Image (cartoon, grey):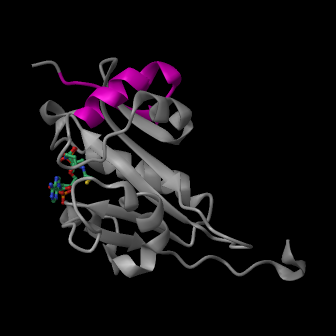
Amino acid sequence: MKKQKYRIREAGFADAPAIFAIIKKHPDELVPRPVSDIIQNIDRFLVAEADGAIVGNASWGILPEIGQAKHPTIEIKSVAVDRAHRGTGLGRALVQAAIRRVKKLKPEMVIVLTFKPEFFRKFGFSEVPKESIMHKLYTGCVNCTKYDSPFTCPEVAMGLKWKYDPPAPGGK
Ligand SMILES: CC(C)(COP(=O)(O)OP(=O)(O)OC[C@H]1O[C@@H](n2cnc3c(N)ncnc32)[C@H](O)[C@@H]1OP(=O)(O)O)[C@@H](O)C(=O)NCCC(=O)NCCS
């Protein structure tokens, strides 16, 4: 059998329909996203390509902060790999690439809300209390129609934090 060539790359507008289709195939694990939202946030998507077809994606969003926060929280979301391509390392490659990308922004914390905590533990994520991500609950979970409250929702909140170098003398 011919070995498939995979690559992870930044998404472009032309990828939006394929991303929409992959997210739509995972209604139990992923929050549905309209095409318009995918298009508006296309620069926050990575895709996995196999022989020219989109077979996986991952994205991120910046949670709101009020005031002078230097290191806001970023959520990694919409992580999925097409069933036929699972178990080949694509999920890992997508999450690692998303972490590398968002780390450049020096967030205070990267979070995920997931039914697959063991998968995300592999990248250093550990469970955090949902009370510690109230900005996510108020901007996302508040619109959920599946569960009456984020605290009864079985999704696990996980966070990943780093220590950054202290700022250089003079604040530069
Ligand atoms: C979770 C998902 C993205 C993994 O994709 P994948 O391409 O099969 O994962 P990989 O092949 O890169 O696996 C990487 C590692 O994670 C492990 N892993 C894969 N799926 C896992 C799961 N569901 N639970 C726990 N570990 C998992 C693999 O065994 C592998 O471990 P190893 O490197 O120690 O051998 C894929 O199963 C998927 O799309 N699921 C549906 C959507 C979903 O649940 N997304 C998660 C966000 S809620």
When the figure is inspected, residue 101 is found, relative to residue 123, above or below; the finding is above
Q: Residue at left 36%, top 45%? A: 94
Q: Which one is nearer the viewer's eye here, 133 or 92?
A: 133
Q: State yes or no: residue 10 in magenta.
A: yes
- Viewed as shown, does residue 10 lie left or right of 68? left
Q: Residue at left 28%, top 27%? A: 21
Q: State yes or no: residue 81 in magenta.
A: no
Q: Which one is nearer the viewer's eye here, 155 or 94?
A: 155
Q: Position of residue 7 (x, y in %)?
A: 37, 32
- Viewed as shown, does residue 138 lie left or right of 17? right
Q: Position of residue 75 (x, y in %)?
A: 45, 59
Q: Quadrant of the C terminus?
A: bottom right
- Viewed as shown, does residue 29 lie left or right of 162? left
Magenta-drawn segment:
3-24
The image quadrant of residue 62 is bottom right
Q: Position of residue 38 (x, y in %)?
A: 46, 34
Q: Position of residue 22 (x, y in %)?
A: 27, 32
Q: Residue at left 81%, top 78%? A: 168
Res. 90 in view: no
Res. 103 in view: yes
Q: Residue at left 42%, top 28%? A: 35
- Viewed as shown, does residue 113 lie left or right of 88? right
Q: Residue furthest right?
A: 170
